[in-house]
């Protein structure tokens, strides 16, 4: 895999922005031959090495701040039962999910609602929304990677092993929840149109979406947070713009999970609030919140330009650091999700410097990282493997993982990525 930073000026692109339709974008990152999947459960080393690959050509829209992969080919991707991005094996993330569920039920009044979850994964979040004491909710989850019974919670939850699309809109909903899916969709307005159709018959239609915050990625120079699956990355402004153009009134967009995620709350715009351009009026948006597509937002383009100027230096610094750590003893990466998989593909593609990758998800343990073939192990295995240093991919889990190492009596150093 090769990587370059494109520090060119504003470009006129043949690929219009999928959110605002703008024709000017700033190309700031290109990588050739990256694994198209980061979270496949691959049981054989040679299959991991032979994983399918594609290209990154990341661009920031000058007009709305949306970031997208101009080289994305959805035909390369295949989501099924062997795809697993479950994060709830971490107590920290599990608590975070519980807080979101409580917020929805107790503060947003998601009670006695027909809930549709787009991209429900293994169904954990939807089960909690429906099972929350006294909520009275029912739910339908859509995800081709779902594994489990077709029904749960005494029949109040059902699951469909398929992607959410135009034909799914026939399942009526009062509330649509979509967490960490829209960034996988190359044409996000099409997804939002399908969601809008499903909500059309509700007396109180609402949506709650969560997605990575591209501003956090760019601000912190997280070079391993750009990968093939995430073809659509949003700033707060571009996320509000997308929903406004799709006929929603945006009530709130804010950062969560240490600033890494964006959380959006919206409702269907009334007929009189939709103008000729299709953008919703924003009378209900609180002061200081992003407003849909009223004027160009150059913030993300500026951040992308700054990222492009620093990316080569940061990647070289990490290569030097990894060489030094490997000379000092065995090295592990903590986190076999997209961050960890992208890190080893960037900095150790031949699997010569990093001994293994740690993950708390038992479904990933004993498998191999797509692209490099690094083994995925339990944290309890670090001592027997003689690992001296483990590089933590997500600082949100630092205290939790330090406690795990201490309880297990493992003396490995846990190093921050920055």
Image (cartoon, helix red, strand yellow):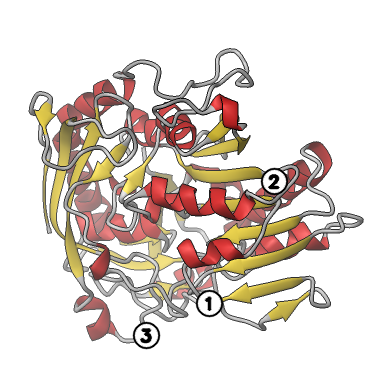
Quick check: can you spot residue 165? no
How packed mark 3 is, by other alpha carbons closer than 10 Å (few <14, some 14-19, many 20 or more), is some
Query: Are circles 2 and 3 on residues that touch, CB within 8 Å?
Result: no
Against 306, residue 30 (above or below) is: below
In the picture of the structure, the residue carrying the numbered disc 3 is: 43
Mark 3: secondary structure:
loop
CA distance separating discs 1 and 2: 24 Å
Mark 1: secondary structure:
loop
Q: Which residue is drawn at 17% across and 42% down?
A: 15
In the picture of the structure, the residue carrying the numbered disc 2 is: 100
Mark 3 or mark 1, which has the lower sequence index? 3
Residue 32 point in image, percent of width and height: 11, 56
CA distance separating discs 3 and 1: 22 Å
93 sits left or right of 260 in the view: right
Residue 153 point in image, percent of width and height: 80, 73
Residue 206 point in image, percent of width and height: 66, 43
In the picture of the structure, the residue carrying the numbered disc 1 is: 161
247 sits left or right of 41 in the view: right
């Amino acid at each position: 895999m090769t990587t370059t930073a494109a520090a060119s000026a504003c470009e006129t692109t043949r690929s219009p922005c999928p959110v605002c339709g703008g024709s000017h974008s700033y190309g700031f990152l290109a990588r050739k031959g990256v694994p198209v999947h980061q979270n496949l459960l691959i049981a054989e080393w040679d299959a991991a090495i032979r994983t399918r690959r594609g290209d990154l050509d990341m661009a920031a829209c000058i007009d709305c701040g949306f970031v997208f992969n101009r080289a994305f080919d959805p035909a390369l991707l295949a989501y099924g039962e062997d795809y697993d991005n479950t994060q709830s094996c971490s107590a920290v993330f599990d608590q975070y999910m519980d807080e979101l569920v409580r917020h929805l039920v107790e503060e947003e009044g998601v009670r006695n609602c027909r809930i549709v979850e787009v991209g429900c994964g293994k169904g954990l979040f939807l089960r909690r929304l429906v099972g929350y004491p006294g909520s009275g909710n029912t739910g339908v989850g859509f995800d081709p990677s779902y594994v489990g019974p077709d029904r749960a919670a005494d029949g109040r939850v059902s699951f469909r092993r398929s992607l959410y699309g135009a034909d799914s809109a026939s399942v009526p909903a009062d509330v649509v929840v979509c967490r960490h899916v829209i960034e996988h969709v190359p044409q996000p307005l099409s997804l939002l149109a399908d969601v809008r159709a499903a909500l059309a018959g509700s007396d109180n239609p609402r949506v709650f979406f969560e997605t990575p915050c591209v501003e956090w990625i760019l601000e912190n120079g997280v070079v391993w947070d750009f990968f093939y699956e995430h073809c659509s990355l949003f700033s707060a402004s571009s996320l509000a713009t997308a929903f406004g153009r799709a006929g929603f009134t945006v009530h709130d967009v804010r950062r969560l999970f240490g600033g890494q995620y964006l959380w959006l709350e919206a409702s269907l715009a009334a007929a009189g609030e939709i103008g000729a351009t299709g953008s919703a009026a924003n009378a209900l948006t609180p002061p200081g919140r992003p407003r849909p597509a009223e004027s160009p937002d150059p913030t993300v383009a500026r951040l992308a330009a700054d990222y492009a100027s620093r990316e080569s230096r940061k990647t070289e610094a990490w290569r030097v650091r990894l060489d030094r750590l490997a000379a000092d003893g065995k090295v592990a990466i903590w986190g076999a999700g997209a961050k960890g998989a992208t890190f080893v593909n960037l900095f150790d593609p031949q699997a010569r410097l990093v001994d293994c990758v740690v993950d708390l998800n038992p479904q990933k343990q004993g498998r191999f990282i797509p692209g490099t073939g690094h083994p995925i192990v339990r944290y309890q295995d670090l001592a027997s493997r003689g690992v001296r240093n483990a590089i933590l991919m997500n600082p949100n889990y630092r205290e939790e993982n330090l406690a795990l190492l201490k309880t297990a009596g493992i003396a490995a150093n846990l190093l921050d990525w920055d």
